[in-house]
Image (cartoon, rainbow, N blue to C red):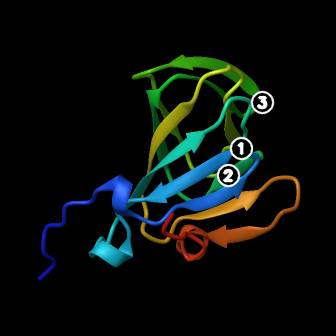
Amino acid sequence: MTKPVILRPDALPVNDRGNGARTIPLVTRGCGSTSMINGITAFDPGAKIGVHFHNCEESVMILEGEAVAEIDGERHHLKTGDTTFIPPNVPHRFLNETEEPMRIFWIYADINASRTMVETGIEQTIDDEHEKAKRL
């Protein structure tokens, strides 16, 4: 039987994704999840991630700051509390076009979630991405 877990972001490893974006994996297989993955990604001013899509549904909430969500080629300006729902295989990315920090909370609806980068076609599981996370 899986036990409940309390996760404290300040004590967890961080995955530096480059371009000023850093991810803290939260709920993963490592804590016993069998059906979902979530975490927090922080974006420095001007930071952005490449256009990508997932093999499952994703929801993203803006925790801090303002963001631009590019979803299927359309730009959406988001503020703290705004939340997206992105179906599988829809190209998207998040950008911080402000001079202030921005943070998002994301949830993938499948423990076997993957990310495919549109520019390169390279697919990687979210589990594999989390393997790169290091304690700061």
Q: Quadrant of residue 29?
A: bottom left
User: Circle 3 — which element?
Assistant: loop
Q: Which residue is mark 1?
A: 91
Please tell me which of labels 1 and 3 falls first in the chain.
3
Question: Residue 73 shows which numbered tag?
Answer: 3
User: Circle 1 — which element?
Assistant: loop
Q: CA distance from mark 1 to mark 3?
A: 8 Å
Residue 48 image offset from top left, x and y in percent: 73, 39
Residue 84 image offset from top left, x and y in percent: 49, 31
Which residue is nearer to you in this view: 12 or 59?
12
Q: Quadrant of residue 134?
A: bottom right
Label 2 with label 1: CB-CB less than 8 Å: yes
Please tell me which of labels 2 and 1 falls first in the chain.
2
Q: Amino acid at mark 1?
A: Pro
Q: Residue furthest front?
A: 136
Residue ID at (56%, 67%): 126
Q: Which residue is mark 2?
A: 53
